[in-house]
Amino acid sequence: MKRFLMIAVALLPLVVMAQARIGIVNSQQIFELMPEKANAEAQLKALSDRYHAEYELLRSEFDKKYADYQTVAADASMPETIKERRVQELQESDKKMREFERRAADDIAARRAALTAPLTDKIQAAIRAAGEQGSFDLVLDTAVTPVAYSGPNTIDITPMVKGILGIE
């Protein structure tokens, strides 16, 4: 991505000198308006809720073990080996919870990527189509590359891309 930006910045003066047609688009704005986004969000929420419910089970299991440990630890007549075993159980339970959290976060991130990839591919195809229809030499995505200034000759093709995708 950085390589692309460096090449684009290096070629920008040449393109401008040749009176190129430059367009800008905000892919994030388009993404937010896509009807498919709501379905993806619903699937992610359902997955997240399932993981949260499972985590709560692990948490309640840990809390029970901790309460048991406090009872055992307060009993002066309890042998040290039993107390140590309870501490070890707590540590294992804590480790299990942390591992579950990590794996759940990884799974949710992978699912998010899988659900949004088709949407971003669709947006990129529409941007490409709009660029070709409008005979643009360069289209910058303001959601990815901050544009410090766009002059009066720069054309915002976001509405054109929305039209190609059939969204308003």
Image (cartoon, grey):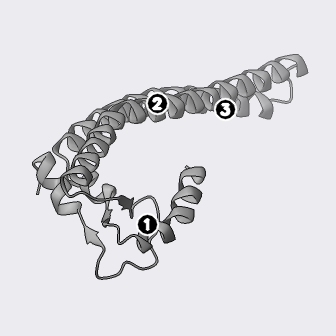
Q: Please state the horizontal and vertical placement of residue 41, each as a whole percent of the image.
A: 28, 41
Question: Which corner quadrant of the image does residue 86 belong to?
Answer: top right
The label nearer to you, 2 versus 1, is 1
Residue beneath disc 1: 15
**Horizontal side of residue 89 vs 139, given as left or right:** right
Front one among 151 and 113: 151
The amino acid at mark 1 is Val
Examine the rendered structure and indicate whether residue 131 appears above or below residue 145.
above
Q: Residues within 10 Å of mark 3 (few under 14, many from 20)?
A: some
Residue beneath disc 3: 66
Quadrant, the C terminus: bottom left
Pick whichever of labels 3 and 1 is earlier in the sequence.
1
Question: Which corner quadrant of the image does residue 16 belong to?
Answer: bottom left
The label nearer to you, 2 versus 3, is 2
Front one among 20 and 94: 20
Query: Residue at the right extreme?
Result: 80
Pick whichever of labels 2 and 1 is earlier in the sequence.
1
Find out whether the residues at labels 3 and 1 contact each other: C-beta distance under 8 Å: no
